[in-house]
């Protein structure tokens, strides 16, 4: 924390903006021949990143969202993921770009990507802002990656601790989550 009680800055707004622009350029190039892209955000963490990313794309696209919950209690298997809000659109025959804030153990994205393939998507690619690769427990193929981060708890630019800090305009490190509770 800084002296004014805010999380210490890890990735500045300027660096975020530059990288989001680079990712958008890559996506625009890769999908040049695709008819219409279905962009699926994972609520709530991806919202700020997704908004900035998609405003930089000029190709035709459709926006959709879903929300998951992960359970890591003793009564559930490790990495069990449940869908709390499903998509509005059908995936059959669509090119899907999945947009997520951070991949940690990888269970959430592994489950969701498998589900999208199962529902008949023509292609599924994953775009994540932050990759906590050191925490991975199951492999996930990331097609577009903003930054790799160490094993620290990050907040801001959509990422939260207990639904707080999402509106910070930068990525910060919460040194001791829960310490101020
Ligand atoms: P995974 O299934 O372990 O990959 O979980 C990914 C989810 O964990 C993300 O969508 C976030 O909601 C949450 N998460 C993991 N690490 C962090 C962090 O450092 N800050 C905020 N949320 C995190």
Image: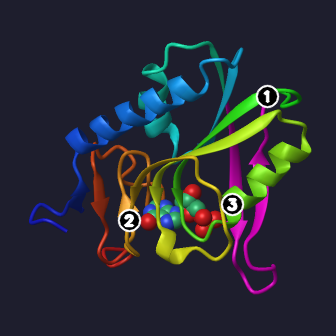
- Closer to the N terminus: mark 1 or mark 2? 1
As measured in the structure, the alpha-carbon distance from the residue carrying label 3 to the one carrying label 1 is 19 Å
Disc 2 crowd, CA 10 A, few/some/many (<14, 14-19, 20+): some
Q: In this view, does 181 lie above or below 113?
A: below
- The x and y percentages for residue 77 are 81, 80
Outermost residue toward the bottom in this view = 74
Was residue 75 drawn as part of the magenta stretch in this picture? Answer: yes
Q: Residue at x 35, y 43 (%)?
A: 167
Residue 4, quarter of picture: bottom left
Does dot 1 land on a helix, a strand or a loop?
Answer: loop
Which corner quadrant of the figure contains ligand 1? bottom right
CB-based contact (under 8 Å), mark 1 and mark 2: no
Disc 3 crowd, CA 10 A, few/some/many (<14, 14-19, 20+): many
**Residue 149: image tag:** 2
Q: Residue at x 55, y 67 (%)?
A: 104
Q: Give the range drawn in magenta.
A: 64-88
Q: Which residue is drawn at 66% across and 17% down?
A: 33
Disc nearest the viewer among 3 and 1: 3
- The x and y percentages for residue 105 are 60, 71
CB-based contact (under 8 Å), mark 3 and mark 1: no
Does dot 2 land on a helix, a strand or a loop?
Answer: loop
Q: Which of 80 and 20 is in front in this view?
A: 20
> Is 114 positioned to the left or the right of 61 in the image?
right
> Is 114 positioned to the left or the right of 38 in the image?
right
Residue 79, quarter of picture: bottom right
- Closer to the N terminus: mark 3 or mark 2? 3
Quadrant for the C terminus in the image: bottom left
- The x and y percentages for residue 128 are 52, 49
Residue at image mark 3: 108
- Closer to the N terminus: mark 3 or mark 1? 1
């Amino acid at each position: 924390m800084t002296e004014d009680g805010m999380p210490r800055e890890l990735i500045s707004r300027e660096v975020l903006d530059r990288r989001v622009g680079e990712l958008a350029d890559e996506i625009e190039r890769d999908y040049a021949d695709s008819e219409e892209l279905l962009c699926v955000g994972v609520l709530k963490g991806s919202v700020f990143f997704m908004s900035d990313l998609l405003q930089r794309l000029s190709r035709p696209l459709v926006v959709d969202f879903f929300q998951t919950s992960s359970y890591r209690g003793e009564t559930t298997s490790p990495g069990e993921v449940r869908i709390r809000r499903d998509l509005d659109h059908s995936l059959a025959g669509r090119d899907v770009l999945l947009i997520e804030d951070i991949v940690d153990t990888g269970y959430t994205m592994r489950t969701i990507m498998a589900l999208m393939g199962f529902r008949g998507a023509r292609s599924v690619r994953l775009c994540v802002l932050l990759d906590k690769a050191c925490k991975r427990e199951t492999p996930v193929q990331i097609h577009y990656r903003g930054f790799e981060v160490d094993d620290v708890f990050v907040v801001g630019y959509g990422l939260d601790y207990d639904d707080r800090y999402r509106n910070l305009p930068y990525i910060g490190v919460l040194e001791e989550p829960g310490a101020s509770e």
